[in-house]
Amino acid sequence: MTMKNHFGTFDPSPGHERGRQDYLIAINRTPEILGAMDKQTEKVLFPRQQLCLVDALWASKGGPGRNSTHQPNFLTMGVMSPIVDYQMATKFRGERMG
C-alpha cells in the first residue's frame, strides 16, 4: 500500500517480478526512506518522518483479477510506511473482510 509508493524513487522493474517481495522490503530499508543509519549496526540513527496516507483502498476476496468486494470508506495515516501497511492490512482484513 504505502511501501509500494517508493517504486518511483527506485527501479520498479524487479518489484513486479513474481516472488520478489524482498525487493519491496529492501528499498524500504534504505537510508533514503528510513533516514541516516549506522553502517556497522545497521540501526537507524535519525529516523526520517514521512506522512503516509491510504485514502482509497479497495479489496476483494478470491485473489487477483476479481471485482472489488470491500471498500473501507476511511482515511488511514501514519509516519512509518511499513507500520502503516501492517496495521492497515491486519485491521482491514480482520475487521472489515472477516
Image: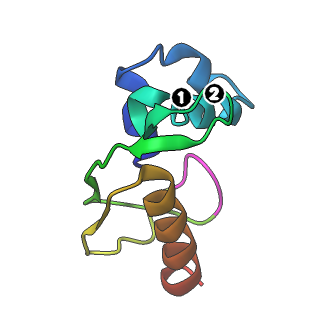
Q: Secondary structure at mark 2?
A: helix
Q: What colour scheme has been applied to the protein in the rendered image?
A: rainbow
Q: Residues within 10 Å of mark 2 (few under 14, many from 20)?
A: some
Q: Residue at x 48, y 82 (%)?
A: 96
Image coords of residue 55 (percent x, y)? 25, 60
- Name the one closer to the observer, 70 or 35: 35
Q: Residues within 10 Å of mark 1 (few under 14, many from 20)?
A: many
Left or right: 16 as drawn, with respect to 41: left
Residue 23 shows which numbered tag? 2
Query: Eyeballing the image, is 33 above or below 81?
Result: above
Image coords of residue 48 (percent x, y)? 34, 43
Indicate yes or no whether the magenta region holds residue 65: yes
Query: Eyeballing the image, is 98 above or below 18?
Result: below
Query: As shown in the figure, which amino acid type bears the numbered disc 1?
Result: Ile
Q: Which residue is mark 1?
A: 27
Cα gap from disc 1 to disc 2, whole angstroms: 6 Å
Indicate yes or no whether the magenta region holds residue 96: no
Q: Quadrant of residue 93?
A: bottom right
Image coords of residue 46 (percent x, y)? 40, 43
Query: Eyeballing the image, is 82 above or below 41?
Result: below
Q: Which residues are magenta?
A: 62-66
Image coords of residue 86 (percent x, y)? 54, 63
- Name the one closer to the observer, 48 or 71: 48
Q: Secondary structure at mark 1?
A: helix
Question: Circles 1 and 2: CB distance less than 8 Å?
Answer: yes
Query: As shown in the figure, which amino acid type bears the numbered disc 2?
Result: Tyr
Query: Eyeballing the image, is 90 above or below 4?
Result: below
Looking at the rendering, in which quadrant would you find the C terminus?
Answer: bottom right
